[in-house]
Structures are given as C-alpha cells and as structure tokens.
Image: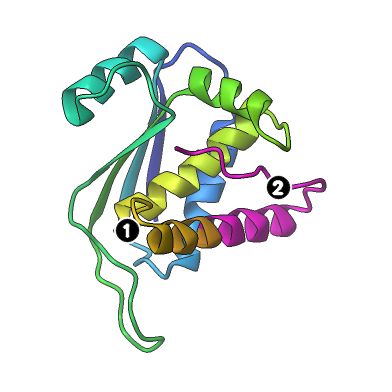
Amino acid sequence: MSIDVNNESGTEVDEQAILDIARYALARMRIHPLSELSVIVVDADAMEQLHIQWMDLPGPTDVMSFPMDELRPPTKDDDEPPQGLLGDIVLCPEVAAKQGTEAPTQHSMDEELQLLTVHGVLHLLGYDHEEPDEKAEMFGLQAAIVDGWRAEKGLTGPSPAPTVS
C-alpha cells in the first residue's frame, strides 16, 4: 500500500498514526495492497478554500475526500480487489482540535484526525452518510475500524465518538 502523508498545516500532527490507521482501514476493507492514497493536512484557510470551491459551503471543514479511480471493496471473500489510485484525503487539524474538545467523549486532536482519516477512506470507497441507513452503515464501520486499530495498538480508553458532520 502506497500512502503519502503531507503536512502543510504548520501544526504538529502524528503523521505516523495517520499513516498506520489509513493502512489498517484499507487492509480491513480488502483494498488491493498496491493501491495508492494521499493524505494532505492543511490549515483552516486552505480547507475553507477547498470547501467553498468543491462544496460551495463557507468556512473550513474537518475532512474532504477526492476519489480518483472509484475503487470499491470486493463484494465476495474470494474476489480479487482491483488496484488503483484511491485519491486524496484532506484533513484540517484546527477543526479536528475543536471537534475533539467538543465531543461527548473528549479526545485529542490526533485522535480526531485518526477518526477523520478512516472517515475519509470510507468516502473514497463510496460510503456516504446522507441518508439514515447509509449513516448507520458508514458510522458503524468507521467505529469498528477505529476500535480494531486501537485494540491492535494496545490503546486504552474510550474510542473517539463520531464527530464528523
């Protein structure tokens, strides 16, 4: 799996954890091991520009996903996953820090960025949360992936509650 993490935000973030959880999520979703993903960490001004340009919405947001080859997880256990470019995930640590402190289970900016990375991966794989049933599926899968990764890493304490809008 080729995953690049590029921090352009000026904020110190745990890039290794972002890389690790992205790799874990892609493996769990059975994405081809030669697929490629880019994660870019930007400041609030850059995120706001992207949010306006692509969503026509004001202000910065927490995470945006830009799919490339529209890869999907295999539907059957014996199906060979396709290889390709997943796309880009853009994260904003300033928004993540605020969301982490406002969440029901308060958590750090880095924990929020980990959650947002999984959220972004799922969007790249075609998951959405516009409808209640889609939201239940996506957020359930997101929680299972974050919890699985945290358990594998031996991290204790409650997992971050979904704060993604």
> Magenta part of the protein: which range?
142-165
Q: Quadrant of residue 56 in the image?
A: top left
Indicate the secondary structure of the residue bearing disc 1.
loop
Is residue 13 visible in the rendered image? The answer is no
Residue at horizontal 36 percent and vertical 86 percent from the top: 76
Magenta segment: does it hold 164? Answer: yes
Query: Could you tell me the amino acid type at mark 2?
Result: Ser
Say if 154 sits above or below 72 in the image: above
Indicate the secondary structure of the residue bearing disc 2.
loop
Question: 160 or 70, which is in the foreground?
Answer: 160
Residue at horizontal 25 percent and vertical 70 percent from the top: 82
Question: 163 or 152, which is in the foreground?
Answer: 163
Residue at horizontal 40 percent and vertical 45 percent from the top: 120
Say if 95 sits above or below 126 in the image: above
User: Which residue was labeled with disc 1?
Assistant: 125
Q: Find the distance from the CA under tag 2 to the CA under tag 1.
A: 23 Å
Q: Give the left or right position of residue 149, taking residue 85 as reference.
A: right
Q: Residue 43: which disc?
A: none
Residue at horizontal 40 percent and vertical 50 percent from the top: 121
Q: Quadrant of the C terminus?
A: top left
Magenta segment: does it hold 46? Answer: no
Q: Residue 159: which disc?
A: 2
Say if 27 sits above or below 53 in the image: below
Is tag 2's residue or tag 1's residue first in the polypeptide sequence?
1
Q: Give the left or right position of residue 95, taking residue 157 as reference.
A: left
Q: Position of residue 145 (x, y in %)?
A: 57, 59
Is residue 140 visible in the rendered image? The answer is yes
Query: Could you tell me the amino acid type at mark 1?
Result: Leu
Q: Give the left or right position of residue 67, taking residue 18 as reference.
A: left
Q: Quadrant of the N terminus?
A: bottom left
